[in-house]
Amino acid sequence: MAASQYGEDKRRNDSRDCILEPLSLPESPGGVSSVKGSPSVPCIFCEEYSPPSEQNQLLKHMIIEHKLVIADVKLVADFKRYVLYWKKRFSEQPITDFCCVIRTNSEAPLEEQENYFLLCDALPEDRALREKLQQQRLREVLEQQQQERYDMNFRGTCMFCDKEFTGNRSVLLNHMANDHAFNVGLPDNIVNWKEFFDVLRKKIDSLQCLYCEKTFRDKNTLKDHMRKKLHRKINAKNREYDRFYIINYLEFGKSWEEVQSEDDRELLDNQEEDWSDWEEHPVYAVCLFCEKQTDTTEKLYIHMEEAHGFDLLKIKSEYGLNFYQQVKLVNFVRREVHQCRCYSCQNKFQSKKELTSHMEQTKHITFLPARSVWDQPQYYFPTYENDTLLCTLSDSDDELTAGKRKEDVPVISEDISNIEALKQSSVLNQLLGEEMNNGEP
């Protein structure tokens, strides 16, 4: 089809340019050419070509002009080889021998109906092709990595200190890891190292932090930022780096995070219950009125008293709260604060910050409502899941019982108005006299 004719048809069909699924094209593995010769990717049906960077335009062309939809394009390891294969097959047999037919506007008049053809891996031939391309791509990437592992002709300078290195890439990588605490992983896990290093250097030269990706005014400021913030690493969430790590080629269409999570689940499913290597991680208790977190409840009690004027231990003592009543009180306060409502005057506010400010200024933070308001069964259920504060409340049943026992014991002071009479009639004096008499021979 002539370019002018295609452009005219494209403009005519803009109104019905509907993409049936998001288009995401795989990038070729670094340093590996998909097919020798022209890098352009041809249309399966006509003479239209697109460069690799504009393959989405080619897919759009095949949908609009030829009604062909390729399912899960992101799972095609080598798009050009895939297209060339089906270009040959469609020239040998009708497209309906391979593709499902999707009819649109099936209830409309015949002239308004359109047939789309879906090419997907439900077809055994297509599935086999995709698997073959994936294995071939992985093999090429591993060959590229093997070549780089033993390449002794590398020459480059450190992006941090401009020190020059020659020989194997591992020398420079180990230098940056040991002398600058910058680690991109083991050299054997990286492929197409030269391009990877050029990408990192280009970012540094453009004064961009490799981790948070913020830009700074000069190189010294950037270096100080990366050193102080411990940003001497790449942003693992940036998909731009995926093509430089072997793990992203193991199962095409899956990122390193997905592959790693599957490996972790398989390990957990197969291992026996062994707690010998258990490492306890610190848990943090969160304030009832703000986002402050502390590693102990004692620190949290101090914070709430000093910052907000809320003394939970004093309230527990004055109200004689047992463990379960403390639980209900904490859940009640958390629920009211979550709803930005003052539990004393019932006024609502736009944010938790405004609520806390109001309660502190009016001293409402210390005025609890009647016990019947919060001492209810519904507050047995935690407002927040895994509320550490609930797990560390002290059981005051024993304390209260001990306190009552002490209160039941009467303490009567002796009348010391007549000290001489007291000395003669004192119980202690009598006991002492009996002891001395018993001690005589």
Image: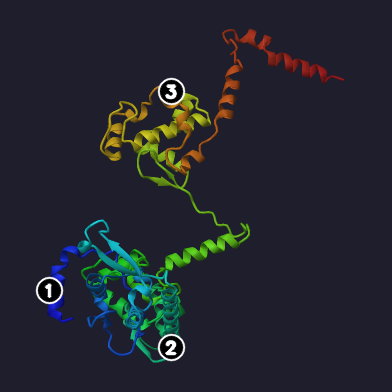
Lower position in the chain sequence, tag 1 or tag 2: 1
Question: Is 121 on the left-hand or right-hand side of 202?
Answer: right
Up-down: is 239 above or below 82?
above
Kindly report the distance in space between the C-alpha atoms of the residues bearing marks 1 and 2: 49 Å
User: Label 1 crowding class (10 Å Cα cut-off): few <14, some 14-19, many 20+?
Assistant: few
Residue ID for mark 2: 147
Task: Give the camera-side residue of 362 and 100.
Answer: 100
Type of amino acid at the residue the image marks with label 1? Glu
Type of amino acid at the residue the image marks with label 3? Arg
Q: Quadrant of residue 358?
A: top left
The residue lying at 45 percent from left, 86 percent from top is 146
Tally of numbered tags? 3
Lower position in the chain sequence, tag 3 or tag 1: 1
Q: Which x, y percent locates residue 40?
A: 26, 83
Up-down: is 387 above or below 162?
above
Of circles 3 and 2, the one toward us is 2
Whether residue 26 is visible to the viewer of this picture, yes or no, is: no
Of circles 3 and 1, the one toward us is 1
Task: Give the camera-side residue of 314 and 212.
Answer: 212
Element at label 3: helix
Residue ID for mark 1: 8
Task: Give the camera-side residue of 163 and 325.
Answer: 325
Whether residue 243 is visible to the viewer of this picture, yes or no, is: yes
